[in-house]
Image (tube, rainbow, N blue to C red):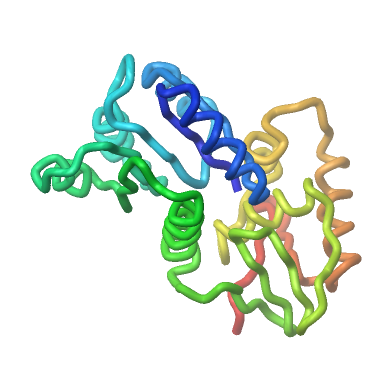
Amino acid sequence: MKILLLEDDISYKETIQEYLESLNYSVESFENGDEVVDALHFKKYHLLLLDIRVPGKSGYEIVKMLREHKDDTPVIFITSLTDIDNLSIGYELGCNDYIRKPFAAQELKYRVEQVLKLFYLHSNDEYLALNNAYSYNLTKGKLLYKEDVVAITPKEKNVLDYLITHLDQYVSTKQLWEDVWEEKMVTEADIRMCIKKIRDKTYAEFIVSKKGFGYKIDKKR
């Protein structure tokens, strides 16, 4: 799962980033709101962690811009603001949660997991049940067959994350190249090979493909 972090306190930023990366999230961090706006034009993220008062565009302005462009990427505000009037602004703009400084690492972990599960899986369950006795933990990137862990590589995990967050929707090879491989020098054959390796570890229709549409993972029937 890819998280964008906006925090202008360097010590806080580094601490948050290191902690989230220790939980196997991919984190890109910024200290200036204008840099975040630029990044959002070119990349997709599963979650935005935004400080409110930062140089350049504020966290509020970034969320307002996203929602005006019909981008519903989930947002957690990081703030030292405590009065209800300021908190209400964020919720009215469309944020999903707040976390107040100072906060414990475990609180951040739980809030991130909760927002991701509710937004992408519409559930509080730790694992998403899939067809044929498979299940997937989105926040930990863990694939199970019944009770057994299926070993996957980091890139296979990224592909599964992407397909699970687009559950029951076809995503094209181009989308995978842009958002998972981040437009690096890979061919369609490389992407197909990654898909094949996941199928080899599960079963042929675990990832469904359709010519002209792309790939998808189906909801449990």
Q: Nearer the viewer, residue 205 or 118?
A: 118
Q: Residue at x 71, y 43 (%)?
A: 173
Place of residue 44 in the rendered image (x, y in percent of width and height, measured from the top left) = 53, 37
Q: Residue at x 68, y 50 (%)?
A: 212
- Looking at the image, residue 199 sits to the left or right of residue 137; the answer is right
Q: Nearer the viewer, residue 51 or 167?
A: 51
Place of residue 70 in the rendered image (x, y in percent of width and height, measured from the top left) = 32, 42
Specify the farthest residue to the left: 85
Q: Is residue 40 above or below residue 188?
A: above
Task: State which quadrant residue 137 falls in.
Answer: bottom right
Q: Residue at x 80, y 26 (%)?
A: 185
- Looking at the image, residue 92 sits to the left or right of residue 142; the answer is left
Q: Is residue 143 above or below residue 95?
A: below
Place of residue 73 in the rendered image (x, y in percent of width and height, measured from the top left) = 41, 45
Q: Nearer the viewer, residue 85 or 175?
A: 85
Q: Is residue 179 above or below residue 137?
A: above
Q: Residue at x 68, y 41 (%)?
A: 180
Q: Is residue 35 above or below residue 87?
A: above
Quarter that holds the C terminus? bottom right
Task: State which quadrant residue 89 falls in.
Answer: top left
Task: State which quadrant residue 18 falls in.
Answer: top right
- Looking at the image, residue 40 sits to the left or right of residue 51; the answer is right
Place of residue 135 in the rendered image (x, y in percent of width and height, measured from the top left) = 68, 75
Q: Nearer the viewer, residue 92 or 162?
A: 92
